Image: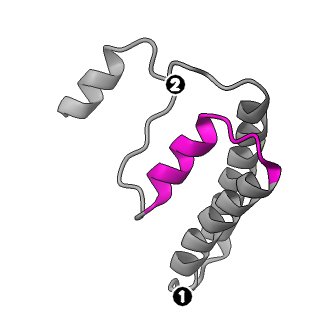
Amino acid sequence: SRCATIIENNPNTRLVVSSACSGVTNILVELANGVQDQEHRAELLKNLAEIHDSILAQLEDATEASSEVYGILDTVTSLAEAASIQANTKL
């Protein structure tokens, strides 16, 4: 696809978000830019979890998906904390 070609041709690409739920991209970009205020960062992460919880709640058996989603959210939390210490100005 055209999107994949653009991403592959840019060696500086660090993060790619596709088909995100409403609001998710904005939250991820804000976190990646480095949110210094710990309470605001926690609120953004909570909002991100709530968006995904609402989707998981609609699944008949969300056990496996939940495990994957929460693993990813844990990674996002770690990366958001790292970005708050040293944000990347190239984003």
Please indicate whether residue 7 sits to the left or right of residue 16 in the image. left
Residue drawn at the location 18% of the way across and 30% of the way down = 2
Locate residue 71: give its quadrant.
Answer: bottom right
In the image, residue 62 sits, relative to residue 67, either above or below, namely below
Q: What residue type is disc 2 on?
A: Arg
Crowding at dot 2, Cα within 10 Å, few <14 / some 14-19 / many 20+, comes out as few
Residue 30 picture location, percent across and down: 56, 44
- Between 55 and 64, the one nearer to me in the picture: 55
**Residue 14 — which label?**
2
In the image, residue 60 sits, relative to residue 65, either above or below, namely below
Residue drawn at the location 63% of the way across and 61% of the way down = 69
Locate residue 43: give its quadrant.
Answer: bottom right
- The main secondary structure of the magenta stretch is helix
Crowding at dot 1, Cα within 10 Å, few <14 / some 14-19 / many 20+, comes out as few
- Between 71 and 24, the one nearer to me in the picture: 24
Image quarter where the N terminus lies is: top left
Mark 1 or mark 2, which is nearer to you?
Answer: 2
**Residue 60 — which label?**
1
Point out the tag, 1 or 2, that comes first from the N-terminus. Answer: 2
Residue 9 picture location, percent across and down: 31, 14
Please indicate whether residue 82 sits to the left or right of residue 15 in the image. right
Which region is colored magenta?
23-38
Residue drawn at the location 45% of the way across and 21% of the way down = 13
Secondary element at image label 2? loop
Residue 85 picture location, percent across and down: 79, 29
Secondary element at image label 1? loop
- Between 47 and 72, the one nearer to me in the picture: 47
Q: Distance between the residues labelled 1 and 2?
A: 34 Å
Residue drawn at the location 50% of the way across and 86% of the way down = 58
Q: Does the magenta stretch include residue 31?
A: yes
Q: What residue type is disc 1 on?
A: Glu
